[in-house]
Amino acid sequence: MIRPWRYWAVESAAGSALVAGGLALVFLYGVLWAGGTTRHTVLFSKDTIVYFFIDVVLVVGLQIFSGNSGILSFGHTAFIGTAAYAASLLTIDTVLKPYVSPGLPHYLETHSVGLLPATLLAVGLVGVLALATGLVVLRLDGASAVIAILSLLLIANVVFGAWTSVTRGAGGLYGMPESTTIGWAFGAAVLAVLVARVFKDSRTGLQLQGSREDAFSAAAVGVHVRAARLRAWLLSAMVSGAGGALFALKLGAITPSTFYLQETFTIVVMLVIGGMTTVSGAVAGVAVVTFVREVLKPYESRSLDLGVMHVDRLTNLTNLALVALILAVLFFRREGLVGRRELDESLRRLRRAPGQSPHALSGRRRKRAP
Amino acid sequence: MAPLLEVHRLTARYGPITAVREADLAVNEGEIVALLGANGAGKTSTLGAISGLVARSGEIRLDGREISKLRPEQIVRRGVSLTPEGRRVFTGLTVAENLAIGAAVRRDRANEQRERLLELFPVLAQRLHAPARTLSGGEQQQLAIARSLMSRPRLLLLDEPTLGLAPKLVALVFDLIGRLRAEEGVTVLLVEQNVHRALDLCDRAYVLRTGRIEVEGTPDELRRTTRIEDAYLGIVAG
Amino acid sequence: MTVIAVTGPYLVQQAINALSLGSTYALLALGLAMLFSIMGLINFAHGELLVIGGYAMWALLEHGVPWPAVIPLTLLAPALAAIAMERIAFRPLRGASLVTLLIASFAVSLLLQTVFQIFAGTDKGIELPSWVDDVVDIGPYTISVLKIVMTGVTLLTLLLLTLFLKRTLLGIAMRAAAEDFEVTRLMGVRANAVVIAAFFLSGLLAGLASLFYFTQSGSVGPFDGTEPVVKAFIAVVIGGLGSLTGAVVGGFALGITEVVFDAALPAGAQPFGTAFALLVVIAILLLRPQGLVGRPVGLT
């Protein structure tokens, strides 16, 4: 794709306006109609919407790396969890902290900060870890890479559970202020979408997508595949980490099992259902899964009488639905619901008259690079 | 007598790319027919289509019976065996094991067939229990052909059997193909880059160009025209 | 730091521990490697095959089936489940990309776990035969009978498997398919036959592993399959992807590493044992990305 325009980033940002607009609608719904923390007559509670936005941040974060590089990461939950723990330790009330986390260094024990600084610091920590792990893990390819990344998740899980003086082990951390409001969550989601989109259309992003199809050929034309992957890994981990911090500061209490295989599966499912290769896909996936979950939740406590057998509680009905969804996508529409092109790109193609070049000016003034 | 292999309007595709367009060809029993053409002309794809590996449409008849809708495994059972381009022997298996796999569809009298092939390819007899990856290029080519012959096919499809071989080995392989026809009664459809050698050996030849059959004829006829060079060099026929 | 008396009997004991742990990992890794080398499938649901074996054991014992019958049936149950898995979930995806297959196997895994939860929510206890706790005294050493049996059976299984792969036509076809699936089809070998055989074997191996695993743990729960299968993946990767020998080597290597760390770490660092072992794994991958056994071709 030729990119003659110097201000491509603006075009990318504008492209993500469609998705951002969708998020804004959800935000408005959340603010105006959704009441309190439980469902009344309205389908989605405010809490659900906050978690929806947080999930958008998490899944879009994953998309930045996996969507562009083609390497499915089962390890991002390690970064999410690390950021969650870090943000928690930074925000728990100083009165409570020594009891929760006796092993903290004195300075941390006596100081706590608010949501924004905590999130930024957590993201910074995750960035450092991502750099270290990326240099190691991204040397591998294919299945080896997938397994090595999975090992990171395992290591994180062990650390969360074993470093009891700091993380409080299996009991987990509690006492975090629930400061993630719908406003913060919405803002983070929009920002994540923007960042992901701009990265995707950037030179590194394009190079990475080239290597996704054929790493060998990409390297042969001078693409520094490892460097591109590392950049994506870093950015991706940091965005996911931001989501993790916000998550902890919404939930108020976390345990190591919050950030293990179940959560990993959930975000992977969201990404795959929506479509790994696009940011719109990531958001769509979150929307679909959240919707399905909410619809099925009331049925989970019911029991089922099939005559021949009686099932007491339909626990994990949502899991079954997710499995069905994901198998359906894999069998019938492997690229995901959204497919290969961003939603706004698909719309633009529809608007264009047949036969017109994609670079036709269509009435807009554009500067062409010399 | 009806041809052993009849192909009508064969079209072969790799996804959106059409490699072979509306090709017609025929191979009579006992013939050696060559498929010539430049790189990318569709020769390998034609063989791939006949053996069922490539998505295809059109008519393919073996002994009068349609095989165009069959799976590769079924086509082999009907008596068509492809020796793919680049030899592609199982390098992790021994020579004997490679031959054993070749006989997977015709287990009866497999030992007999093996003995005959080992006579034809004495170098394989010497290296019978060596891993195939320790064989030289020429030896691997012989193994690939022998492997295909273990199923006692009626029609042998050979894809560039002399690719990458030293001239002495090229001569050996061509000699072998001739002997196969003479002694074993195998019909051969041969894809070759080496036009002169191929014309020396074959009874008839087809020339492919960007997926279409451009020229057809006996070696004498083909030697007299310039159309082969034209096809190879992309010159539009005058 | 705890002082370890590194005496003869202690070393022998730990060696047996390492071997028997390694055997379980090796069996699991082998089951995984089989599917990976032939069709590029990383089967996350392999852990659930293990659990199916466990549930089979439990169900059979509950109904008073004697042990000599329990053993073959426990081997068979996961094998049949594996074939069903292939037919239902993986055949429609034949030839799909690595990522697609991986996600599909993840989905199957979750599905099975959910089904287990719904129908067998609580952990089920397994009644163990009395000889499980037996120890035997060989000279100055006291060794658990079970561990010896496990190691012995594993080695025997490996031998039988090797014979199968080298001497039978199906075994040779599987090795050929692992190297070049397309050309194997060109030889007239039915693709389905090879794939079904691979799944069946994979399930058998999981069944054997479940016999060892649950006899030691004594209970079966819906999520018991996750941790072993993850360890098995790691074993496959450190041994070298695509190689059966590598899987076995990797399994034993992982078992030995774990036992070493378990024994050598000071008490405070004990819970981090797995993390250290994983770091070793990553180190191995860094130094030898192709795994300990190098880059062999196909099923060797």
Image (cartoon, coloured by chain):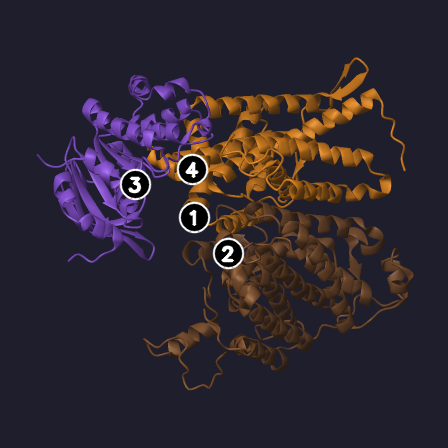
Q: Nearer the viewer, residue A235 or C38?
A: A235
Q: The purple chain is which one?
A: B
Picture coordinates of residue A184 (x, y %)?
Answer: 69, 75
Q: Which residue is label 1 attached to?
A: C93
Label 1 to label 3: alpha-carbon separation: 17 Å
- Mark 1 and mark 3, same subunit? no
Q: Which of A365 and A284 is in front in this view?
A: A365
Q: Looking at the rendering, which quadrant does residue A269 occupy?
A: bottom right
**Dots 1, 4 in contact, CB < 8 A:** no
Secondary element at image label 4: loop
Q: Is residue B11 visible?
A: no
User: Few, some or many C-alpha atoms within 10 Å of disc 2 (few <14, some 14-19, many ≥20)?
Assistant: some
Q: Is residue C24 left or right of residue C37?
A: right
Label 3 to label 2: alpha-carbon separation: 35 Å
Label 3 to label 4: alpha-carbon separation: 17 Å
Q: Which residue is label 2 attached to?
A: A218
Q: Which residue is label 4 attached to?
A: C180
Q: Residue B71 carries which label?
A: 3
Q: Looking at the rendering, which quadrant does residue C176 occupy?
A: top left
